[in-house]
Image: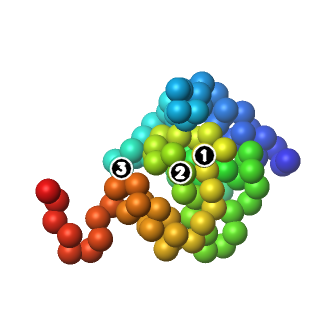
């Protein structure tokens, strides 16, 4: 692992909480406006990266081009690698609808 990835791994690990009753390991650092964990990546990288994507790459492996990382638990703050799965965007949307996290286009809130 290169020096930058090792530094990012250590920084990421210090901001992931212990597993809760559902096995979710919450991000303890900054959150974006939609509730996803964010971490400053460092020089030569985008200003911030999504914490769950970094957790996946560090502890599972590379994310293939065109794939997104789904929280199988539905918890946007969760960084437990066992709760993260690389899927297509279409599959991620399908799962979100099935979990009740999203509404089909044109559907109104109750």
Q: Whole-percent x and y of residue 21?
A: 53, 26
Q: Residue furthest front?
A: 98
29 on left or right of 43: left
Please say if the residues under marks 2 and 1 sit with CB atoms less than 8 Å apart. yes
Q: Whole-percent x and y of residue 75?
A: 46, 43
Q: Residue 75: which disc?
A: none
Tell me the residue that label 2 is attached to.
71
Tell me the residue that label 3 is attached to.
34
Q: Nearer the viewer, residue 1 or 74?
A: 74
Q: Whole-percent x and y of residue 71?
A: 53, 51
Tell me the residue that label 1 is attached to.
83
> What separation in Å lies between label 2 and label 1 (alpha carbons)?
6 Å
- Crowd tier of the residue under label 1, counting other residues whose Cα lies within 10 Å: few below 14, some 14–19, many 20 or above: some
Q: Secondary structure at mark 2?
A: strand
- The disc, 3 or 1, on the residue closer to the chain's N-terminal end is 3
For the point 40% across and 55% down, the residue is 99
Q: Nearer the viewer, residue 110 or 41?
A: 110
**In the image, residue 22 above or below residue 18:** below
- Crowd tier of the residue under label 2, counting other residues whose Cα lies within 10 Å: few below 14, some 14–19, many 20 or above: many
Q: Nearer the viewer, residue 3 or 60?
A: 60
For the point 58% across and 33% down, the residue is 23
- The disc, 2 or 3, on the residue closer to the chain's N-terminal end is 3
54 on left or right of 39: right
26 on left or right of 60: left
> What separation in Å lies between label 2 and label 3 (alpha carbons)?
14 Å
Q: Nearer the viewer, mark 2 or mark 3?
A: 2
Q: Nearer the viewer, residue 45 or 57?
A: 57
- How many marks are shown on the rendered structure? 3
Q: Nearer the viewer, mark 3 or mark 1?
A: 1
Q: Quadrant of the C terminus?
A: bottom left
């Amino acid at each position: 692992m290169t020096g930058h990835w090792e530094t990012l791994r250590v920084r990421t690990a210090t901001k992931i909480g212990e597993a809760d009753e559902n096995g979710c390991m919450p991000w303890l650092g900054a959150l974006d406006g939609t509730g996803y964990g964010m971490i400053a990546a460092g020089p030569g990288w985008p200003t911030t990266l999504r914490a769950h994507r970094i957790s996946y790459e560090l502890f599972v492996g590379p994310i293939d081009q065109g794939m997104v990382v789904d929280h199988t638990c539905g918890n946007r703050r969760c960084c437990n690698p066992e709760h993260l799965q690389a899927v297509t965007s279409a599959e991620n949307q399908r799962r979100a609808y099935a979990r009740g996290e999203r509404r089909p286009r044109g559907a109104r809130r109750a």
